[in-house]
Amino acid sequence: MENKYDRVFNFAAGPGNLPLPVLEEAARDLINYQGSGMSVMEMSHRGSVFKKIAEEAEATFRRVMGVPDNYKVLFLQGGASTQFSAVPLNLMKTGKADYVVSGLFSGKAFKEARRFGDAACIASSEDTNFDRIPAFTKKDLRPGTDYLHVCYNNTVFGTHFAAVPDAGDVTLVADMSSCIMSEPVDVSKFGLIYAGAQKNIGPAGLTVVVVREDLLGASRPETPVMLDYKTQADAGSMYNTPPCWAIYVAGLVFRWVEETGGLAAMKARNEKKAALLYQTLEQAPLFTLNAQKDSRSLMNVTFHTADPDLDKLFVAEAAKAGLVSLAGHRKAGGMRASIYNAMPYEGVVKLCDFIQNFSEIYAKGCTK
């Protein structure tokens, strides 16, 4: 693939890389959006030009994700971390909520929910350093709980739910920040889905919330107006100035996903990339994968050697080869290759070649 822009392969966990066609179109529109005489970053969010941008972005997202008509799609600010507070403020009606703690951010969401009521951890994989999705069933949910919260893909430790958990009649809430639009998902099985944009959707600054309409209008009295889903839904995500540029770029990404085959095709491409990378790491004697096989993520592949100094050397040498941002999260160490939707197959091939060469040089008789 021709690299006319001298771009590296960016394996960052977020902000992640964006599709090149999206960047090219955004660059063309940057100064003068489609003859409007101004940039999207300059125009009124209540004007007809931006209104059309936002409406088209939402419509495309709904088509690609298969969002049912009885769900609202909100374009908000504050990142997924703000939703750690917004979810219990809007949904914790009886004061009880259950959480599955399968990684760093689900742990943060659980900790925040405890500030607002009786939040309980019903399952956790912390005892094995979050190397798997912990087992649980709907029987583990407490009677009268308002919702079950899960983090569908764990960016730091590289794990992912293999299937939608069965919450029975309890509202299922999912943080999908690092896997949204990477595969088909039945939105109707969830009461609420939220996702920070900066991994698979667009630039940082936008958070997408998909919420079933019957869950609106019952927020706690102390809920700040900006965190009330009904307020945002009634205002069409424009109670105040929204993240206009981020919404515009997200709309381009939604269209790119649709035009390249939708979520079924995206899943097939992601599975192909992940299979190659996991197979390469399994066969390289120098490296060990962090996540158990039945919980492995298609988006974030975490691995390490037996020597932290060798891990640092791997990251440094990879960067010299144009393979950047491969250092693992500070809580996990080692390496992390985030291979989101926009990561081309060629990038994974180049990384695999580098892994094999590095292993041959430094393995020194190492066997698994």
Image (tube, rainbow, N blue to C red):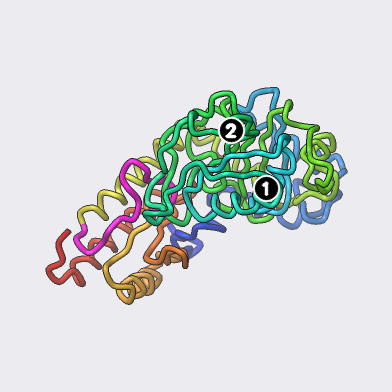
Q: Is residue 93 above or below residue 153?
A: above
Dominant SS in magenta: loop
Residue at the (84%, 38%) spot, across then down: 235
Residue 24 seen in render: no
N-terminal-most mark, 1 or 2: 1
Tell me: 135 left or right of 279: right
Q: Quadrant of the C terminus?
A: bottom left
Range of the magenta residues? Answer: 284-301
Looking at the picture, how far across and down is residue 96, in whole percent? 65, 38
Looking at the picture, how far across and down is residue 76, in whole percent? 73, 46
Marks 1 and 2 sit apart, C-alpha to C-alpha, by 14 Å
Q: Amino acid at mark 1?
A: Gln
Looking at the picture, how far across and down is residue 195, in whole percent? 61, 45
Tell me: 97 left or right of 121: right
Pick the residue in front: 281 or 92: 92
- From the image, tell me which residue sits under label 1: 83
Q: Is residue 227 above or below residue 72?
A: below
Dot 2: element:
strand
> Within 10 angstroms of label 2, few (less than 14), some, or many (20 or more) residues?
many
Q: Residue 172 has which mark?
A: 2
Looking at the picture, how far across and down is residue 319, in whole percent? 40, 70
Q: Where, by quadrant of the figure, is residue 351 drawn?
A: bottom left
